[in-house]
């Protein structure tokens, strides 16, 4: 009877565990394994090369490191501009203000759209010859600033970062707003009774209480932005001349372009470890900030 | 001496400034979409010459052309099929598991649950590489079922987490009553637990639906044949093949984006809930 009972319990988790084992655990093991091989994905024989792939990534693959720096650039851009914008918007909405729900509705539209849709629409707006942005610049007499935004090596990466932030700030906005609404109104009252003006109650009450939330948004931004790549495929495909390449695009290129499955997996492990290290450091940092 | 009038004007001025700021950002959010729809209504000739927001003639036939000739009708149905199948799969599978993790005792429960939670935290960039190899071995590559199973796995961990958190807080009295009435475990799950979990199920459904509808890279590596492709991959393929046919591309983009926007507006409450709940995971 008890055995039957236990077996019955396993029936509940069986489908989930089965799918998880096949589509998560096996791939996880294979990534680690394949990273040690040179394999084109088709031949039945794989050549064991040990840590050779990792050596190549670390010391020879300059485009890989370039792609890492470029992802870092987009991330720093998102961490500052995107999150400051998100915070300001949340702060502006966290009061008795008309149309609050309307703004909240609008600001989360870019995040629900797919990266392909966003990328292709912006690519059309930013098109060098027929794009709306250059049309507009010409109309207000600033045609000197018009350029082929996504094909010019000087502007391509920053343009991608701007569009990425446009798509992403809604996440930070919603989380910041939820955080701001948990601050008890009495604290503001108390600050005012103690003679604090709007500015000092902002810096002495709002900011300190929002630091944990900001840290959380920061971690989510880093993890999300470092791994973003579909938007870039849709906007530039990684060009011009590798100027908008990011690590996941390199993994995709190693697999589909040069058929080096082992190398692609090694890049995946390397990148995963770097991401975990970054979020661990951020986590430690945020715990420290909370104790102060 | 600062008078009441001074403070009132100051407050109004600040409010106006805040609204100007919010309105500008709101316009920036909407404008690209308006431009997308506007471009989809122009012709192959006017789209490059006429930068007006409201076209002089509305060429709705672009939508018909995109749907039929561009094949977006087919891709739309594919996306719909994948989204519905994956969401149904996730709802059933993750709610069964979450219910067991919340209510039953069995050996290995702690480890299994920790496994799902760890999967939520550990990023595997490029997990599409081994998935491609795996599906090849299973002869599931370039099949709908292969894609559907992969996508069920993608949504599983978070859905189990959300549902288990909900079940943990749900009072057990109703289930006890059903058990005394002779209801089986599966019966209780179906007749008692699931109906009570409706609010959190809505969050699970909306988030997974958005996720599947918008998914690109797995579909890219899994599907070779066009008749199986979902919208996202088909859009990129169309853009690669007919680089200059912007009106049809824009119509295709509108066809892809519109269902998402409608679902979002109808289910906004659950999305806000999901984002804040998801943030608490961290």
Image: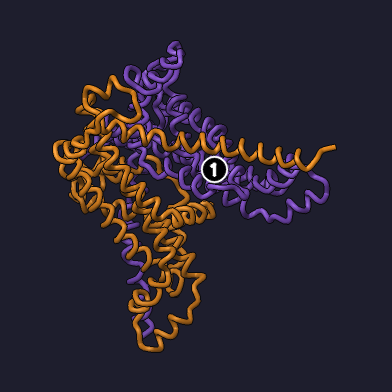
Chain colours: A purple, B orange
Q: Name the residue at 24% across, 33% down.
A: B58
In the image, taking residue A285 as reference, residue B38 lies left or right, namely left
Left or right: A91 as drawn, with respect to A55:
right
Q: Is residue A4 left or right of residue A221?
A: left
| Residue furthest front as drawn | B5
**Front-most of A237 and A69?**
A237
Query: Which residue is rendered at x = 78% and y = 43% of the image?
Result: B4
Question: Extreme bottom residue here?
Answer: B181
Q: Quadrant of residue A196?
A: top right
Residue appearing at x 75%, y 40% in the figure: B5
Q: Position of residue B8 (x, y in %)?
A: 72, 42
Q: Is residue A263 shown above or below B256? A: above
Q: Secondary structure at mark 1?
A: helix
Residue found at the very far right of the displayed protein: B1
Residue A43 seen by the camera = no
Q: Of residues A284 and B220, which is closer to you in this image?
A: B220
Vertical position of residue A187 compared to residue A202: above or below: below
Q: Quadrant of the N terminus of chain A?
A: bottom left
Are there few (<14), some (14-19), or many (20+) residues within 10 Å of tag 1? many
Name the chain under label 1: A
Task: Identify the residue position indicated by label 1 in the image.
Answer: A219
Camera-side residue: A268 or B212?
A: B212
Quarter of the image where one finds residue A3: bottom left
Asked if residue B1 lies left or right of residue B39, the reply is: right
Q: Is residue B42 visible?
A: yes
Residue B279 location (% of width, % of height): 52, 51
Residue B124: x and y, percent? 40, 44
Taking the view exactly as shown, the residue that stands out farthest to the top is: A144
In the picture, residue B182 is in which quadrant?
Answer: bottom left
């Amino acid at each position: 009877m008890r055995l039957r009972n236990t077996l019955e319990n396993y029936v509940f988790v069986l489908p989930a565990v089965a799918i998880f084992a096949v589509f998560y655990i096996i791939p996880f093991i294979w990534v680690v394994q394949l990273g040690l091989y040179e394999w084109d994905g088709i031949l039945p024989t794989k050549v064991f090369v040990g840590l050779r792939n990792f050596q190549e990534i670390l010391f020879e693959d300059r485009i890989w490191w370039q792609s890492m720096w470029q992802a870092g650039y987009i991330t720093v851009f998102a961490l500052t501009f995107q999150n400051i914008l998100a915070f300001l918007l949340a702060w502006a909405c966290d009061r008795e203000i008309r149309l609050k729900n309307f703004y909240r509705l609008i600001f989360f539209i870019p995040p629900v759209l797919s990266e392909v849709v966003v990328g292709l629409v912006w690519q059309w707006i930013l098109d060098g010859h027929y794009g709306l942005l250059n049309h507009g610049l010409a109309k207000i007499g600033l045609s000197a600033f018009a350029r082929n935004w996504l094909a010019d090596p000087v502007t391509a990466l920053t343009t991608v970062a701007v569009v990425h932030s446009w798509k992403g700030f809604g996440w930070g906005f919603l989380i910041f707003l939820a955080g701001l609404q948990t601050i008890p109104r009495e604290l503001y009252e108390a600050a005012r009774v103690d003679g604090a003006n709007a500015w000092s109650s902002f810096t002495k009450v709002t900011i300190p209480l929002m630091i944990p939330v900001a840290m959380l948004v920061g971690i989510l931004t880093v993890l999300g932005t470092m791994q973003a790549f579909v938007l870039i495929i849709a906007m530039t495909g990684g060009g011009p001349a590798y100027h908008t390449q990011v690590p996941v695009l390199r993994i995709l290129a190693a697999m589909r372009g040069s058929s080096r499955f082992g190398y692609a997996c090694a890049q995946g492990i390397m990148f995963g470890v770097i991401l975990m290290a970054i979020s661990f450091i951020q986590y430690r940092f945020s715990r420290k900030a909370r104790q102060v | 001496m600062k008078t009441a009038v001074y403070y009132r004007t100051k407050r109004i001025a600040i409010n106006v400034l805040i609204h100007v700021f919010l309105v500008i950002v709101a316009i920036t959010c909407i404008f690209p979409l308006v431009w997308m729809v506007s471009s989809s209504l122009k012709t192959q000739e006017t789209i490059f010459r006429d930068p007006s927001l409201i076209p002089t003639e509305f060429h709705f036939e672009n939508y018909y052309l995109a749907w039929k000739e561009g094949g977006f009708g087919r891709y739309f149905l594919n996306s719909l099929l994948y989204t519905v199948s994956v969401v149904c799969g996730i709802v059933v599978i993750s709610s069964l598991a979450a219910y067991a993790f919340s209510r039953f005792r069995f050996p290995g429960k702690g480890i299994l649950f920790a496994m799902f939670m760890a999967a939520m935290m550990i990023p595997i960039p490029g997990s599409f590489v081994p998935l491609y190899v795996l599906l090849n071995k299973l002869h599931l590559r370039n099949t709908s079922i292969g894609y559907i199973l992969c996508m069920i796995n993608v949504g599983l961990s978070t859905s189990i987490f959300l549902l288990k958190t909900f079940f943990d807080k749900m009072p057990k009295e109703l289930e006890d009553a059903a058990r005394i009435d002779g209801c089986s475990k599966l019966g209780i799950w179906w007749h008692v637990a699931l109906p009570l979990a409706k609010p959190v199920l809505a969050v699970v459904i909306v988030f997974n639906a958005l996720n599947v509808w918008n998914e690109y890279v797995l579909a890219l590596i899994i599907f070779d044949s066009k008749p199986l492709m979902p919208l996202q991959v088909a859009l990129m393929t169309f853009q690669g093949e007919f680089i200059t046919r912007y009106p049809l591309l824009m119509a295709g983009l509108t066809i892809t984006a519109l269902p998402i926007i409608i679902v979002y507006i109808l289910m906004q409450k659950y999305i806000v809930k999901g984002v804040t709940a998801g943030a608490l995971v961290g």
